[in-house]
Image (cartoon, rainbow, N blue to C red):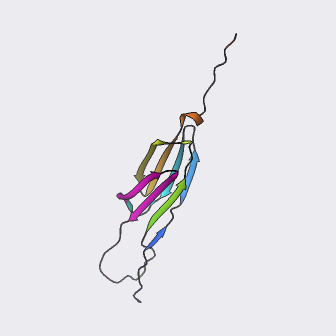
């Protein structure tokens, strides 16, 4: 088979985002990325996610190679409704789950009515 050059690409991950009562939940596909190869940062109004995929370095000639090498990079703009101090991240079976807590001022709350 032809010896193909490997290209190292940086790509976006597929992402699902949903809103719950007191948080925003993001789920991103991160196949081949482990905890040590993952960085999640907040810089100003940007949520930045970088994932380094584990490279396959086995010897031999590839007959079929459909799993492309490459890393992940995503940036999301977050506004003041997100409490930067309550962002949590977990990685399980190639899925990165981010929980972005909402600021107290935007959470739903019940207002008691008093009678005078």
| Spot occupied by residue 103 in the image (x, y as percentages of width and height) | 54, 38
Task: Determine which quarter of the picture holds residue 50.
Answer: bottom left
* Magenta-drawn stretch contains 92: no
Q: Residue at x 41, y 84 (%)?
A: 5
Vertical placement of residue 39 versus 84, above or below = below
* Residue farthest to the front, as pictured: 44
Q: Quadrant of the N terminus?
A: bottom left
| Spot occupied by residue 10 in the image (x, y as percentages of width and height) | 46, 69
| Spot occupied by residue 28 in the image (x, y as percentages of width and height) | 49, 56
The magenta stretch is: 34-61
| Spot occupied by residue 113 in the image (x, y as percentages of width and height) | 67, 18
Q: Main secondary structure of the magenta part?
A: strand
* Residue farthest to the top, as pictured: 116
In this picture, residue 13 sits left or right of residue 60: right
Q: Residue at x 30, y 76 (%)?
A: 58
The tally of labels here is: 0
In this picture, residue 39 sits left or right of residue 110: left
Depth check, front residue: 116 or 63: 116
Depth check, front residue: 41 or 89: 41
* Residue farthest to the bottom, as pictured: 2
* Magenta-drawn stretch contains 37: yes
Vertical placement of residue 99 versus 105, above or below = below
Q: Quadrant of the C terminus?
A: top right
Vertical placement of residue 42 versus 50, above or below = above
* Residue farthest to the left, as pictured: 59
């Amino acid at each position: 088979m032809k010896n193909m050059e490997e290209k190292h690409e940086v790509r976006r991950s597929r992402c699902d985002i949903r809103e719950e009562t007191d948080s925003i939940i993001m789920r991103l596909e991160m196949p081949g990325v482990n905890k040590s190869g993952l960085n999640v940062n907040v810089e100003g109004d940007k949520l930045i996610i970088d994932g380094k995929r584990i490279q396959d370095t086995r010897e031999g000639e590839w007959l079929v190679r459909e799993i492309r090498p490459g890393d992940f990079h995503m940036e999301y703009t977050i506004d003041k409704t997100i409490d930067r101090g309550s962002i949590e991240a977990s990685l399980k079976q190639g899925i990165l789950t981010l929980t972005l807590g909402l600021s107290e001022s935007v959470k739903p709350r019940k207002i008691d009515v008093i009678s005078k």
